[in-house]
Structures are given as structure tokens and as C-alpha cells.
Image (cartoon, rainbow, N blue to C red):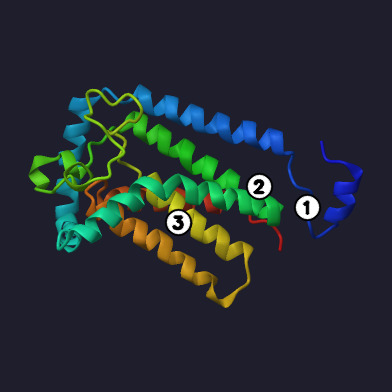
């Protein structure tokens, strides 16, 4: 509950910060529901591979660039591929959590807006994961791509049959890209520096990493961007 002192300090242009315990419980609860939901679709192997062939053929029909063109850039040396694998494994959650913590402390109104947008996108992604299981391109023999994490490390996934911590058949949409894009948008909206547009490098680098490591198709990122655009259109921006 917000105290009278906190409300007075917030003022008309600085909204009161949401209660910390409630926010921690809310964010933790959303994360656990999402993880549980992903597990419900983890065993749809046959359907996931059939959908993978459909996505691969659809990308070729649309003349999208092959994912292998990005991967070939990483495979020129050990350092680029190790850095890409490490970025995929370590940046996704910490960057999003760091954003939420900073917004909570410095921009409460933008924090609430960002949390709502992220929750909406993640919920929509979970529905798509349940209804459209999709094997990533690293599992698709037709793609001819290298599973860079498994070949060079580090990897966050084990063998699909024994990996009970994650759903590897939830490639579409790519929350790696969707969350990264929202991190950039939130920081651009919450700050005024002329250099704030450089935050767009984060989703751009994330896009190259998820495609180059063969964890996602181009259409996975496009689907995530579409869901994010819909959420941004529905959830109103905070007033500056």
C-alpha cells in the first residue's frame, strides 16, 4: 500500500511506485505460468517438425534470405560463434529484468506500462506455442544449419528428449527478439538522450544472434514483432 509520504513525493508528474512485494509476486507468478505452459506443449514432436517444414517452405516462397547466410558469418572463427552463443544464453533474461528494475526505481509509470506490454506479448506467445509447436531450424535437416551451441558452446539446452526445463519446440514467436525489441522501445520512451536510439542495436544484435545460431527462423522474429505491435497499439502509453 502506498504511504501518504510516498504519494506526496511522487507528485502529479511522478506517479507513485507500485508496491514492491506485489510486483515481485506478480512477475514471478507470470514467469511460472509461462514456464508451465511451455511444458504443456513440449511433447508435440511430430507436429513441431511438420510445422518447421511449413515455415521453411514459406520463407523460401517469400524469398526471405536464408538463415545460413547469417550463420556463415559466425562460423568464420571460434570467437564470433562463442560470443553469439553466450549472448543467446546470458543476455535475454538479465537485460529484461534489469530494464524492469531500472524503470521501477526511476520511471514508475513506464514500468507499469512496460510490464503490461511484456505480459501481454508473453501471454499471446504462450497461446501460439501451445497451438503451433515449432522445431527450430537447428533441428531441421532440410535447413542444413549447424547447432552452434551444441557444437561450440555454451548451450542452454540439453537433448530434447531429456530436457525437462525448457520447451525446445516453441520457436514461434521468438521472445528473445520480442523482449529485446521491447527493452529498446521502453528505454527510448522513458529517456530523453539523443543517443537513446542506439538501444535499437540490442534487438538488431539479438535478431542476428537468434538466426545465426539456428535457434529461430526469420518468421519467428516477424511474428514476435507483430504481437508486440498489437500490444503497443492496445496498451496506452504513460504520460510524460
Residue lying at the far front in this picture: please name it: 79
Identify the residue shown where x is 61% and y is 49%: 101
Identify the residue shown where x is 55% and y is 50%: 98
Spot occupied by residue 146 in the image (x, y as percentages of width and height): 14, 48
How many numbered circles are shown?
3
Identify the residue shown where x is 35% and y is 33%: 129
Q: Are marks 1 and 2 in contact (CB under 8 Å)?
A: yes
Question: Against 161, is 151 above or below?
Answer: below
Residue 186 falls in which quadrant of the image?
A: bottom right
Residue 1 in the figure: left or right of residue 159 = right
Q: Are marks 3 and 2 in contact (CB under 8 Å)?
A: no
Q: Nearer the viewer, residue 177 or 151?
A: 151
Spot occupied by residue 230 in the image (x, y as percentages of width and height): 49, 50
* Quadrant in which the C terminus appears: bottom right
Q: Point out the tag, 3 or 2, that comes first from the N-terminus.
A: 2
Spot occupied by residue 228 in the image (x, y as percentages of width and height): 47, 50
Amino acid at each position: 500500500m502506498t504511504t501518504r509520504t510516498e504519494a506526496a513525493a511522487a507528485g502529479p508528474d511522478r506517479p507513485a511506485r507500485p508496491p514492491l512485494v506485489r510486483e515481485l509476486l506478480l512477475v514471478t507468478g507470470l514467469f511460472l505460468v509461462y514456464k508451465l505452459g511451455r511444458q504443456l506443449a513440449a511433447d508435440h514432436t511430430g507436429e513441431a517438425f511438420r510445422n518447421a517444414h511449413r515455415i521453411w517452405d514459406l520463407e523460401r516462397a517469400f524469398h526471405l534470405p536464408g538463415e545460413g547466410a547469417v550463420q556463415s558469418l559466425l562460423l568464420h572463427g571460434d570467437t564470433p560463434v562463442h560470443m553469439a552463443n553466450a549472448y543467446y544464453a546470458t543476455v535475454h533474461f538479465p537485460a529484461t529484468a534489469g530494464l524492469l528494475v531500472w524503470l521501477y526505481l526511476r520511471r514508475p509509470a513506464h514500468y507499469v506500462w512496460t510490464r503490461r506490454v511484456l505480459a501481454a506479448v508473453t501471454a499471446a506467445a504462450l497461446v501460439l506455442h501451445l497451438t503451433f509447436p515449432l522445431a527450430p531450424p537447428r533441428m531441421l535437416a532440410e535447413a542444413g544449419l549447424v547447432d552452434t551451441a551444441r557444437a561450440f558452446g555454451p548451450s542452454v539446452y540439453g537433448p530434447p528428449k531429456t530436457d525437462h526445463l525448457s520447451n525446445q519446440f516453441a520457436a514461434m514467436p521468438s521472445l528473445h527478439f520480442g523482449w529485446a525489441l521491447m527493452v529498446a522501445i521502453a528505454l527510448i520512451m522513458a529517456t530523453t538522450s539523443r543517443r537513446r536510439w542506439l538501444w535499437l542495436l540490442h534487438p538488431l544484435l539479438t535478431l542476428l544472434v537468434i538466426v545465426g545460431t539456428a535457434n529461430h527462423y526469420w518468421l519467428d522474429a516477424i511474428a514476435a514483432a507483430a504481437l508486440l505491435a498489437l500490444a503497443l497499439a492496445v496498451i496506452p502509453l504513460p504520460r510524460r
